[in-house]
Image (cartoon, helix red, strand yellow):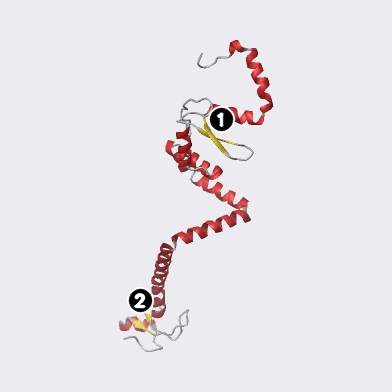
Amino acid sequence: MPLRDGSSRALAVAAGEKYYVSKTSCKRGHHTRRLTSSGSCVECIRITAGKPQRVLRKKERAAIYEAENLEALRTRRRELEAIRRLQNPSRALQKGRRAYQKYRDRISERNRQPENRSKRYFNTLRRQYGLTFEDYTKVLEEQKGLCAICRQTAVPDKKGVGLHLDHNHQTNKPRGLLCRRCNTMTGFLEKHLNLVPSAIQYLLRYDSLVKIEGD
């Protein structure tokens, strides 16, 4: 049993006691017994030892709540992130740049994979034009896998895509699937339709240099 109040730690050590009671209180104001070996307050040790358990229980409750309300929490986080981007677009841009710099090697390695390159292209179609992969496949089947203008098959490019989606640059409305050559041509002609007659006349003027396919 501990020595009575007023006894010093030295007396407790000499008597071989495990505890002793000091005249002064500890830092938390406890007048309880203390350990002879270290002089620590027993009540403080009990409180401190209980903290990790309380923190653990709190984390367990948070994990259970998150598992039960995962979709609602994800939706709420996306909404908050969208609000932050609208309120402070420069901060969102800086955050994206920091993330890219941190994971640049990993992103570059991932983007070099052929399946990921085509996946990024179809994600762009869905985000910008509302066209899903199923819609793209349906149009491709209607065109029998051929370009809508030159009616030829296209070799997949570095994105892993053979035929690219053509769209109206004014309304952003999707049209057909074109090879890269025809897609570039329509993009130019759409902005310079007035040059088409003169271009045809130019080609007819030098018809000996024009190679007509199928002849």
Q: Earlier in the sequence, mark 1 or mark 2?
A: 2
- Give left or right: position of 142 versus 204: left
Relative depth, front residue between 41 and 86: 86
**In x, y percent, where is residue 59?**
42, 66
Relative depth, front residue between 72 and 136: 136
- Give left or right: position of 104 versus 35: right
Q: CA distance from mark 1 to mark 2?
A: 84 Å
Label 2 crowding class (10 Å Cα cut-off): few <14, some 14-19, many 20+?
Answer: few
**In x, y percent, where is residue 78?**
52, 56
Q: Residue at x 61, y 12 (%)?
A: 207
Relative depth, front residue between 32 and 6: 32
Between label 1 and label 2, give the one nearer the viewer. 1
Image mark for residue 202: none
Label 1 crowding class (10 Å Cα cut-off): few <14, some 14-19, many 20+?
Answer: many
Q: Residue at x 41, y 74 (%)?
A: 48
Residue flagged by tag 1: what amino acid is it? Asn
Image mark for residue 183: 1
Image vertical order of residue 86 relative to residue 206, above or below: below
Image vertical order of residue 51 relative to residue 108, above or below: below
**In x, y percent, where is residue 87?**
63, 56
Return the residue at label 2.
37
**In x, y percent, where is residue 117?**
47, 38
Image vertical order of residue 123 relative to residue 2, above or below: above
**Residue 21 can be seen, yes or no:** yes
Snapshot quadrant of residue 86: bottom right
Q: Secondary structure at mark 1?
A: helix
Q: Quadrant of the N terminus?
A: bottom left
**Residue 160 can be seen, yes or no:** no
Residue flagged by tag 2: what amino acid is it? Ser
As drawn, the residue found furthest toward the top would be: 208
